[in-house]
Amino acid sequence: MPQSRNAPDPVIITVIFMLLAIGVVMVYSASAAYSLHKFGDSFYYAKRQLLFAALGVFLMLVISRLDPQFFRHWAKPGLAICFILLVAVLIPGVGILRNGAQSWLGIGAFSIQPSEFTKLGIILYLSRYLTSHAHQVTSFTKGLLVPLAIAGSAFALIMLQPDLGTGTVMMGTALVMIFTAGARMKHLLGLSLVGVLGFVSLVLAAPYRIQRITAFLNPWQDPLGAGYQLIQSLYAIGPGGLMGLGLGMSRQKHLYLPEPHTDFIFSILAEELGFLGGGTVILLFGILVWRGLRVAITVPDMFSSLVAAGVTGMIAIQAVINIGVVTGAFPVTGITLPFLSYGGSSLTLTLAAVGLLLNLSRFSKV
């Protein structure tokens, strides 16, 4: 790795802090009524989100200054730890059950979600493996079988929780990285077909997922059941219009829309800040993806390029799925909006991943 220019991409830094600021404000606005009702403190979630953001920014800045070879060296041990945690979370009495998914480890108020950290672990491992097997990446058996088996095993463990949203983001990110590494298009098309068939099988295997699909196609068929959350989300977005109802003026956050400060925070943002507010957030994500791809293209080595592509792909896929869900473009699945939704593991992990992107941007050729 050549000498760095010692200046992380300022555009990425600016966009991240803008998204974080919007996120903290919107978490407070979206959760104030629910927090006051449940905890007697309207700032309960906002204060915790601010703490998570501070921790995540600290990790981001530390990671942005480390030697990139550090991440390559720890890619295998890090992924091994992720697998151990994924197994541990499935053990009765060890994993914590929330909203029907056994996805957390921890004690009391402090908990982590291993599947979130596994996304980053897969990015680092695949970057290392595909770099060391670059001459075999066009061969399915010699170049792609092992990384796909590793990613597939992680996906299977995540689905046992179950957490289809996180698993989908992880596998989508893996495909982005395999494409970036130079895999043959026929292999990618084949993998995509297998992925679609697998997704259909997972949906058919779980009645609640079938209900989500039918609710996606016609939420008003079951307005008080499977279609309730999507209907309430659309009731939030629709009245927002161009300028919104005004910050803090959402009606749906008053115990109508479930999870207004987590998975459906974009609905409240669109209701209060309108098309201009929602469009601004989408534009910021677009700028972040552009700068991330710019880093992936301009770094001098394959490992760095794959890491940058993986981090950028992970954030882009997650943002597209979340916004697609709350606007009715995709079936409802539990997945957070990066940097905006409330959630400690998701926020700190995503900021740590951005730290990698900033780290690599110091070595960009432009």
Image: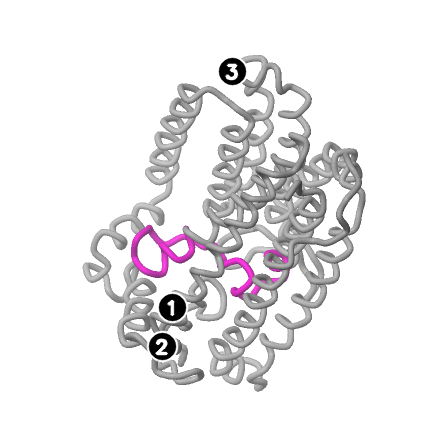
- Residue 102 position within the rendered picture, expressed as x and y whole percent measured from the top left: 56, 51
Disc 3 from disc 1: Cα separation: 42 Å
Sequence order check: which comes first, mark 3 or mark 2?
3
Local secondary structure at mark 2: loop
Residue 252 is tagged as 2
Instruction: Label the magenta part by its dominant secondary structure.
Output: loop
- How many residues crowd mark 2 within 10 Å: few (<14), some (14–19), many (20+)? many
Hey, which quadrant is residue 70 in on the image? top right
Mark 1 crowd level (few <14, some 14–19, many ≥20, 10 Å Cα): many
The kind of residue on which mark 2 rests is Gln
**Which residues make up the magenta segment?**
321-347
Few, some or many residues within 10 Å of mark 3 (<14, 14–19, 20+): some
Q: Earlier in the sequence, mark 3 or mark 1?
A: 3
- Viewer-proximal residue, 359 or 149? 359
The residue positioned 37% from the left and 37% from the top of the image is 205
Residue 333 is covered by the magenta coloring: yes
Q: How far, Cα to Cα, is label 1 from label 2?
A: 9 Å
What residue would you read off at disc 3?
Answer: 140
Q: Quadrant of the C terminus?
A: top right
Q: Nearer the viewer, residue 103 or 17?
A: 17
Q: Is 172 situated left or right of 118 in this image?
A: left
Q: Which residue is mark 1?
A: 267
Q: Which mark is residue 219?
A: none
Marks 3 and 2, Cα distance to the nearest angstrom?
49 Å
Give the amino acid type for the residue marked by disc 3 in the picture: Phe
